[in-house]
Amino acid sequence: MKIGVLALQGAVAEHIRSIELAGGEGVAVKRTEQLEEIDGLIIPGGESTTIGKLMRKYGFIEAVRGYAAAGKPVFGTCAGLIVLAERLTGDEEPHLQLMDMTVARNAFGRQRESFETDLPVKGIESPLRAVFIRAPLITEVGPDVEVLSVYKDEIVTARQGHLLAASYHPELTDDYRLHGLFIDMAREAAGQGQR
Ligand code: GLN
């Protein structure tokens, strides 16, 4: 499976490495035309306001909405999760508005700006090593969204059909199983069954 990583800003090389460790082919996506060549798209962590601004500037908002509407899988991590959300708390402008959830940015407060934990995730056999950096939280999900993990009662991983979202950085450790799960989603969407 060829998995693209949106390469406008943020942790791109690390995601490409995890995709390759999980058995996929990773490509940096810089132009909307490249969406035609990939079986799934990752929107990485970084700074969501900047990523959103650059997506608008280069035509990625409409292009990724069309890509997702065609049933292609999209995975947002950290800032990428914020970009996927239908609603943001406060008066923050949402970006792609693809996933039926409300997201609070920088939700862990100053004392817990960044930390690592072993996180149980539905569909992954043992806890996943997760790195949280100025992480967002999912404060509310719609009926079609499946909660895949909670950390201290707060939702941090969720799936809505072919859309996947994680509050943390799964690409900063050698635990690439969430990338494996996303590659399986891409294979399913491409009609090729499981790994
Ligand atoms: N705090 C960032 C934002 O609001 C997200 C942090 C991250 O991606 N590590 O965009």
Image (spheres, helix red, strand yellow):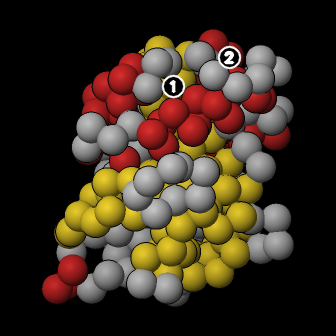
Residue 35: in sight, yes or no? Answer: yes
- Numbered badge on residue 21: none
Decide if residue 116 is on the left or right side of residue 32.
Answer: left
Q: Is residue 159 above or below residue 60?
A: below
Q: Is residue 114 above or below residue 104?
A: above
Q: Residues within 10 Å of mark 2 (few under 14, many from 20)?
A: few
Q: Is residue 142 left or right of residue 14?
A: right
- Total number of numbered discs in the rendering: 2
Residue 20 image point, x, y percent: 39, 20
Which residue matches tag 2?
A: 36
Q: Position of residue 157 (x, y in %)?
A: 53, 62
Q: Nearer the viewer, residue 155 or 29?
A: 155
Q: Residues within 10 Å of mark 1 (few under 14, many from 20)?
A: many
Residue at 56 percent across and 16 percent down: it is: 2
Horizontal side, residue 5 vs residue 174: left or right: right
* Disc 2 residue type (three-letter): Glu
| Mark 2, secondary structure of its residue | helix
In the orientation shown, which residue stands out farthest toward the left?
111
Q: Are the residues flagged by discs 2 and 1 in contact, CB closer than 8 Å?
A: no
Q: CA distance from mark 2 to mark 1?
A: 10 Å
| Image quarter in which the C terminus is found | top right
The answer to whether residue 16 is seen in the rendering is: no
Up-down relation of residue 114 to residue 21 (above or below): below
Residue linked to disc 1: 4
The three-letter amino acid code for the residue at tag 1 is Gly
Q: For the N terminus, give its image quadrant.
A: top right
Give the percent coordinates (x, y) of residue 34.
57, 17
Residue at x-position 32% and y-position 25%: 17
Q: From the viewer's side, name the closer residue of 51 and 98.
A: 98
Q: Closer to us: mark 2 or mark 1? A: 1
